[in-house]
Image: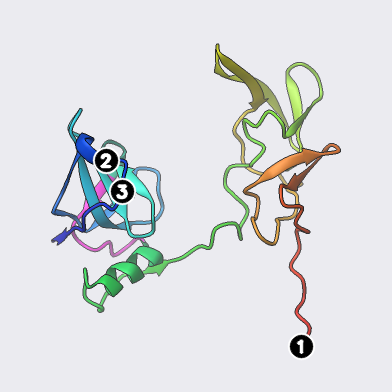
Amino acid sequence: MTVALLPPASRSWGKSGQPLKNGPAFVRSRVGTLWHRSRSGVLILQHGGIVWHCWCGISRHDGRSTVRDDAPKDEPVCATCEGRAFGSGQLPGDTDYATQFTPMYVDPPRRCPGSRDSGLFAEVNWRVGRCLVCAELLPIRAAGSPYNPTVGLVVHAPGVGLVPRCDFHGWQYMRAVDGKAVCNCGGSGVFNEVAS
């Protein structure tokens, strides 16, 4: 079952894309764990690819995603997409599949914020650095371009020494201060108890 798509409300497409009126009900990246609901689609005129915009705010390119029209019975659907699509009238309220919502910045990230960041590691020697975010020892690699070269640690999952998350931003905006990783806002990293 294809669904009626809304116009893409974006200033960026203009003459480079053509909005689609119908599209697949569900889209997911090839490595994703959740199916998302299609909100709008744009045919890119330069090379004929399609970009699917989802109700939760993410976008997926058809060359790097999987689409389907029928409801997934064995895999969860993004609860944010599901709620917004239902509220818009795009789909009926009765569904017999699982939905899932994982709040951002509550659970530790899959990729450590110290990955590939030139300011979030301390050099142990010319090949190895200590991640200031998770305290892991990792290889240092060159990155950037000839005009903007930089170095950083290889992409890695957070280690057991991951710094506490900020109350406001989780691990999103980290910087180094006196050899330690802290949130840019100076958050405390712990939830405060509310007095009753």
Q: Which residues are magenta?
A: 66-75
Q: Which residue is located at x 63 percent, y 42 percent?
A: 112
What kind of secondary structure does the magenta stretch mostly adopt? loop
Q: Tell which tag, 1 or 3, sits nearer the viewer.
A: 3
What residue does disc 3 label?
10
Q: Which mark is residue 12?
A: none
Q: Residues within 10 Å of mark 1 (few under 14, many from 20)?
A: few
Marks 2 & 3, CB-CB < 8 Å contact: yes
Give me the disc on residue 13: 2
- Identify which amino acid the numbered label 3 is placed on: Ser
Which element is circle 3 on?
loop
Quadrant for the C terminus, please. bottom right
The location of residue 166, given as percent across then percent down, is: 71, 57
> What residue did someone put label 1 on?
196
Residue type highlighted by circle 2: Trp
Residue at 68% across / 24% down in the picture?
139
